[in-house]
Image (cartoon, grey):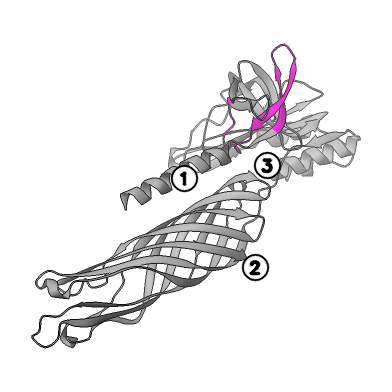
Amino acid sequence: MKKFYLQVIFLIICSTSIAQANFDKGYFIDNNGNKTTCLIKNTGWKETPTKFQYKLSENDDPKFATIKTVKEFGISKVFIYKRDTVLIDPYVEPGDKKQLDYTPQPDYKEKMIFLKVLINGRASLYSYSGPGYQKFFYSFKNTTPKQLFYKRYLLNNTTIKENNQYKQQLFNNFKCETLSSKDALKVDYSRKDFIKFFKKFNECKGFEYLAFYQEQSKSKFNLTVRPGVNFNSLSVTNRINPAFNVDFESQSTFRIGIEAELIFGFNQNKWSLIFEPTYQYFKSNKVIPFRSTEIESQSVNVDYKSIELPLGIRHYFYISDNSKIFINASLVYNIDIPSKIDYELAPSFDLELTSNVNFAIGFGYKYGKNLSLELRHYTNQDFVKVYRDFSSNYQKTSIILGYTLF
């Protein structure tokens, strides 16, 4: 058992390393203005980075570049980060509104940061993200970016007020025939509203601009048929009378399941919730010695059936556009179909089988939109816990083929 877990962990680590080593074509510009074409590791930063990993070629060893040596880097049509020394208010709104600041005005500090370009043109929009917050900046005609300021604060112990200075900033700096003061007042402090406003201003002025933003992907739903093979074994032990010990040994059985998967829209669709009702069974016969002057042996039959209901979390690692690996962990609840172990010559010792909640870990590969293959291992179960003198050990590993219907 320990050997199996070590093998699975080793495979996951190795495959994860391979998947995470996916670099995209990009560039960076150093402090001297030299532009280097390279491959940049896109980790989908939630927080604005201060460094990034790159390779000069596919076979090159990865290297790190930092904000101290690079003033711009990006991946074509995906993102651009530009370095600037700006005035930024470091205040972050606390989760508990009772702990809001009493000061409405900004307390700007000078800081060198990377800014993520959302709109790049005569009127540019940037974002800067940290743990649980996002701040926005603007520049006009290549001026130093300035923070669009917004802050909620306490007027007294119970009254929350807002400093919406950013609306005045928009109105003062971005006037155009098709934009009015009402347009600026309608803008919420959100990525979506700022992008809409800056696009409208650039278009009104006839300025060319490039948009470097991706809307968060929507959640997706997959339904997958998943037949497979179970490699399972069952042994039964009687603590009082070893004559009733049975080892049904290993065998392979068919399983069929249908998986519902909800793929979340955040983090590049790498996380999903999975639920897979599955029919599975174990049926075997074993002849064991029987202590009798007339009969030397007896037949013991097991016929176990259940509907598994695994509920779990899956994480994907992209290898290419059509190829990814995944790992998942599930809590498995079982609906028992009447099952038992039948001692042919000792019916008083027959055992009704009752499954327990257990766990499963899986490691798999998906090709394209439809085909997948998974190796899954389940924690052991004792089907006869209710019997004082008996115990059992049911072990199972599955190989599962999947075909996604939609």
Amino acid at circle 1: Leu
Q: Which mark is residue 191?
A: 3
Q: Which mark is residue 43?
A: none
Report x, y in % for residue 101: 48, 33
Label 2: which residue?
405
- Say left or right for 291 vs 73: left
Instruction: Tell me what residue is drawn at x 20 percent, y 83 percent.
Output: 298
Q: Nearer the viewer, mark 3 or mark 1?
A: 1
Q: How many marks?
A: 3
331 or 49: which is nearer to us?
331
Residue range in magenta is: 25-51
Q: CA distance from mark 2 to mark 1?
A: 28 Å
Q: Earlier in the sequence, mark 3 or mark 1?
A: 1
5 or 128: which is nearer to us?
5
Q: Residues within 10 Å of mark 2 (few under 14, many from 20)?
A: few
Amino acid at circle 2: Leu
Amino acid at circle 3: Arg
Instruction: Tell me what residue is drawn at x 43 percent, y 66 percent.
Output: 230
Label 1: which residue?
11
